[in-house]
Every structure is written in structure tokens, then in C-alpha cells.
Image: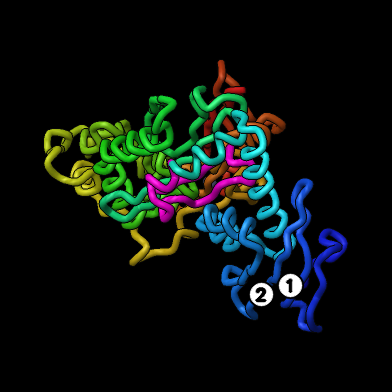
Amino acid sequence: MAIDLSSFPYLVPQDETGRCYDGYLMIGKNEFRVKLTVPLSNLSETEIICEWKLQEIIDEYMPIIRQRLVHCKDLNTFLKEVISIVESKIKYEESPDVTCNLTSHIVSEIEKIGWHKLVAIDTSFHSVTLKSLDSQQREHLLNIKLNSQCINAAPVTTTYLPCKSLFHWNKEDGLVNLFNEFESTLKNYEEFWDEMEEIDTCTWVLEPEKPTYAAVHRRIAIGTNASVQITVDPKQPKVFPECVFLGADQIINPLKENLNQNLYRWDISRHLLVNLETVLDIKFPSPTNSKKEDFSVECGICYCYRLEQFTPDIVCDDKRCGQPFHRICLYEWLRTLPSTRQSFNTIYGECPFCNKSITVKMPLS
Ligand SMILES: [Zn+2]
Ligand SMILES: [Zn+2]
């Protein structure tokens, strides 16, 4: 917690606790008299007493300084950040150029947006992360990387949305407008996120492991060796999604039949999950009645569940065996055996576990 005095040679500790300092901070060509008192528990309540000129600058940037204190692990890092903020302000007063102008411009814009929406800002004021809560209190982050040379140039924005979105940029109120556009774009996808959230909480989603707000796919566990991957249209999330089944034929084929027979029962006024269960005529296993490990059974050859981006997608058709394999593992295994036959791109062999016949298509390279 104590300050590394080699970086701040003009600060003198006032006692042995390492929490009180008196002395000078060198900022640019200026030196400022300061007194620092660090509380025992909370760095963000650090008290800075200083001469009025420095105090004036610090007060102006107080919300940012407080925000930094929360994120800084130690006082050293924090002091360096305060110095860089003050430095850019002093430089601006001496010769207002574009870079420094940017700083005060951004501060006033964030003020308009609201400090409580600021998640992070870097020392050079070029990367700003803002947050917005949607009507279900889901937190959405927007990172804005400003062009350091010119505030008129459109910044690069990063966020998780299911469709590509372009935010417009104008030089006055640039950040404010951009953030407003971001918030109104979020409204377009609330229904989509509602539907996906229901699936994520009421079923076992095997893929993606941690879905972002941009993810439109979900692979949902149906049984030990069976799952369905759905691709949802974010603009019409209640419409029948694209479905791909993975798993042993004896489990998957009846589901495909159910789907064909029941598709007419799909009702877009109802939720996605209810509709899926209706047309497949099943109840998805859920966290209330099962464990996720039951559905992520490892490959019988490499004994892993995940192999790069792949999960086991070939399953032995024998009911008593039902062993899953990665396609690539099974293919490599079978093609070394003399009993294996190959016809075009399909390999016919025996399950390494139960010796029943098993086929695998050549993996796409
Ligand atoms: Zn494997
Ligand atoms: Zn088998």
C-alpha cells in the first residue's frame, strides 16, 4: 500500500504507517505542494490536500479521478494517473491543441451522458467504455476508441449485438449521440435476449459455453448423447429457428419425425422454448433436474470433451453403448485398422467400445 518513493522523490512519509505523505508532486515543469492521507480500507477515499491551482484541476476531473481510484490497485498507479490528467490539462492551457482539446471535450460529453454510465476510461482519454441497462437490467457495454489525431473522425466501437450496427458520428455531441443510438439499438433486440435468456436458464446449453449478447446459436442438451443446435433470427426470435440435431440416430430420428409432424403447432405468439418443446414433443433437461456433466460426455478415444473447437458429435448407435466420439478421433482411429472399409468419403468400421458397426464421414479439412 505504501508509495514507492523512488517514483515520487519529493514526497515524504509522515509516519511509519505509509498512509500519510507531505511534499511535492512534479507535474511537467511545475511542482505542487500536496498532502495525502490514505484510509486503511478504501483507496477510493484517499484525501488529497493541495494548493489551489492543483485543487482546481483535480476538482474539475474529480469524477474521473474517483473512478480511477476504484480501478487502481495501488497508490503509485493512481498518482501517476493523476499526474497524467493534470499534465494534459496544463498543456492545454499553455497551448490548446487538438489532443488536449479532446480531453476536456470528452469530459463534458461524459458529464452529459452521466458518470454512472462510465465503466472505464484510459489515461489518454482515447478509449471509453460505457454501459447501458436494458429493461430487464441486463448490462450492455459499449467501448469507443477515439481517433487520437482528430475528434471529427468516427471512432471505432465495439459491443455485443447480434447484428452488425453502424453508429453515426458527428463532431458536436459525438459521444452523446453515439451512446443514444446505442441505447435505442439495444431496444431492437430485447425480445431476442428475453428468449435466449429463457433458454440459457431453463436448459443446458452446451455451446457456446458462455454465450455473449451477440450469439445467435445455442446447442441445447436433449439427452446423454443428443443435442439440438438452434440458430435464432434476432429480428424475429419467436419464428421457427434453424435446427440441426447431433447424436445417435436412434434418439435423433424420432425427434426429426416429431418435428415434421408437429411443425404446424408452432405458434409465434408463444415463447421460443415452449414452441421447441411442443414441436419436438420433449421436455429439455434443465438445471433443476439434472447436472451439466451428464450431457457433456467425453470422447471415447481422446478422453476429452473439447478438442479445439469441436465437441463429440458422433455417437455409437448401439443403445447399450452410446459412446460419443469426436469425428476426427474416430476417423483417425478407424482408418488404421485392417477391418475398416472405405467408400467414397465414408468409413465403415467397428465401435472401439462394443464392436458394433459404426460409420463416419471424412472430416472436412
Ligand atoms: Zn476425441
Ligand atoms: Zn459402441
Say which residue appears at 32% left-offset and 55% top-offset. 137
Query: Does the numbered disc 2 mark a residue whose Cβ is under 8 Å from ligand 1?
Result: no
- Residue behind mark 2: 38
Can residue 178 be spotted in the picture?
yes
**Which label number is shown at residue 1?**
1
Image quadrant holding the N terminus, namely bottom right
Image quadrant holding the C terminus, namely top right
Where residue 37 sits in the image (x, y, percent)?
A: 67, 75
Is the Cβ of the residue at disc 2 closer than 8 Å to that at disc 1? yes
Can residue 216 be spotted in the picture?
no
| Left or right position of 12 against 308 | right
Q: Residues within 10 Å of mark 2 (few under 14, many from 20)?
A: many
Residue closest to the far top = 344
Q: Is residue 113 a member of the stretch shown in magenta?
A: yes
Nearer to the camera, 354 or 158: 158
| Left or right position of 91 against 104 | right
Looking at the picture, does residue 16 appear above or below residue 165? below
Residue closest to the far bottom = 16
The secondary element bearing badge 2 is classed as loop
The secondary element bearing badge 1 is classed as loop
Which residues make up the magenta segment?
Answer: 109-131
- Residue type marked 1: Met
Residue closest to the far front = 52
- Residue type marked 2: Val
Say which residue appears at 46% left-offset and 54% top-offset. 295
Say which residue appears at 43% left-offset and 53% top-offset. 115
